[in-house]
Amino acid sequence: MNFTRKLLNRETFIGLFIVSLGGLGSIALGIPILGFFLGPIIQQPKEVWRDVGPVDKFKVGSTVQVAFEYSGQLQWGGSTKYTSAWLRRDSGLQFTAFAVYCTHLGCPVHWLAEPEIFLCPCHGSVFNGNGTVVGGPAPRPLFKYDVRIQNSRVQIKTEPQPLVT
């Protein structure tokens, strides 16, 4: 009995109690943090084909902005659950879609039809009609989305972050 008292005195008990609480707190905070960093690796985001309209709606040679809903957004998101892309009809059934965001700092680019350029209003990056960089601080061309025709409708393959192709 005396031997047990020496192993577990008041200071040892309080020390073990504090260390146990610290360990439980670390686990409680560590699991969500690990989930945040490992989640994208374990559960890959889905790529979704978004319908943006009938083929006949788009004129050959024109570039228009088309809106679509972000994947996985909640209904109460309002207008923030939508994004857009620039869609160009190159020929009969050939389309090219560009992400609406500049590759410098992500500002939305504007299409100017007369000189056929994309212009970033934030820092002055300029892109040709094919998305290549003409000038400014943008490090790479505009991101492109895959485009397909299904049942005479144009669809854009969306993803959480457009990739350089």
Image (spheres, helix red, strand yellow):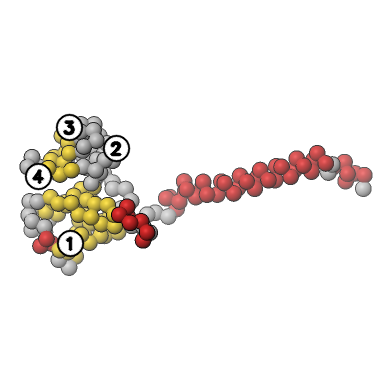
Does label 1 or label 3 sit earlier along the sequence?
1
Q: What number is the disc on residue 105?
A: 2
The answer to whether 109 is drawn above or below residue 96 in the figure is above
- Image quadrant holding the C terminus, namely top left
Query: In which quadrant of the rendered view does residue 116 lie?
Result: top left
Distance between the Cα atoms at labels 4 and 2? 23 Å
Q: Position of residue 85 (x, y in %)?
A: 22, 51
Distance between the Cα atoms at labels 1 and 4? 21 Å
Residue bearing the label numbered 3:
135
Residue bearing the label numbered 4:
113
Q: Secondary structure at mark 3?
A: strand
Q: Secondary structure at mark 4?
A: loop
Asked whether residue 47 appears in the rendered view, the answer is: no
Asked whether residue 118 appears in the rendered view, the answer is: yes
Q: What number is the disc on residue 53?
A: 1
Residue name at image x 17 percent, y 62 percent: 53
Is residue 42 shown left or right of residue 59? Answer: right
The answer to whether 91 is drawn above or below residue 10 in the figure is below
Does label 1 or label 4 sit earlier along the sequence?
1
Q: Position of residue 31 (x, y in %)?
A: 55, 49
Label 1 packing within 10 angstroms: few (<14), some (14-19), many (20+): some
Distance between the Cα atoms at labels 2 and 1? 29 Å
Is residue 24 shown left or right of residue 46? Answer: right
